[in-house]
Amino acid sequence: MIKPLKSKTFLVAIAAIPSLTFAQNYDVKKGKVSIDKNIIATYDGKGGLLRFFDLTVSTPAQKPLISIKEKWCEFKNPLRKDAVRWAEITFLDNPEKKMNFHFPYNNRPLERDLVGYLFKDSTPSLIQGEALNVQAVEEFIKKNNFDFIDDSLYVRKFEKENKDRIMEPLERDKKQPLNLKVDSKGSEIILGNMQYTTVYNIFQDNVLVGQVEKKLTGSKAPMEYPGK
């Protein structure tokens, strides 16, 4: 016969499990992922503004469960369908599961931002106790896996088929100075995040030879495009 005290303890233990399984609000900062101030995971690694990230997400007891390796960064390639930044994510259970994750924004993420992509508010936690939440991992992969290989094959095929046209030299006087002119179609203002992007077309001898992009954020962002 089970004593009432043990029965209550058992029920409380079961009731506590969903707090790590179902949708939660996460706090990701300073190497820790928390729910209601309770640490459910830790993260550490290398990377920064000028270096690709190589991060490991572990349990509170430091058992490695998820590897995040940034693999690619390419801005404004008109041939790419939608890839700018992506990372290879490996779930370190048995057997290992790998996926490619396409960053949803063009701006450079901080370490906590990158980990935060895996722990988004109102989504089930990928880590449950000292193990991966298998169901949540499968759903995350199904929803977010990006076929970068297919995208790259598309680019290579296009470049091969159009090599002569793409590589055709631009006739111009290379002794003339380079001039920058604002491309208003490519420039944008995002007021909510106080982001301002200016795209400049590069001309030499009145021939378009390239483009450069300038980004400003916060209080440095003006409220209208130059020259308007």
Image (spheres, rainbow, N blue to C red):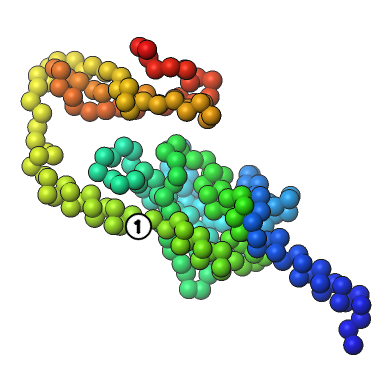
Image quadrant holding the C terminus, namely: top left
Label 1 CA crowd tier, 10 Å (few <14, some 14–19, many 20+): few
Residue at 65% x, 63% y is: 21
Q: Residue furthest top?
A: 227
Q: Residue at x 30, y 47 (%)?
A: 81
Q: Is residue 139 left or right of residue 148?
A: right
Snapshot quadrant of residue 147: bottom left
Residue 188: which quarter of the image? top left
Residue 113, position as x, y percentages in the image: 54, 44
As drawn, is 101 to the left or to the right of 134?
left
Which residue, as the protein is rendered here, is positioned at the far right?
4
Residue at 86 percent of width and 77 percent of height: 7
User: In the displayed structure, would residue 195 be above or below residue 58?
Assistant: above
Q: Position of residue 63 (x, y in %)?
A: 61, 64
Q: Residue 37 at x, y = what percent?
A: 74, 49
Taking the image as drawn, is residue 62 in sight? no
Left or right of 207? Residue 124 is right
> Residue 209 occupies which quadrant of the picture?
top left
Question: Disc 1 residue type?
Answer: Asp
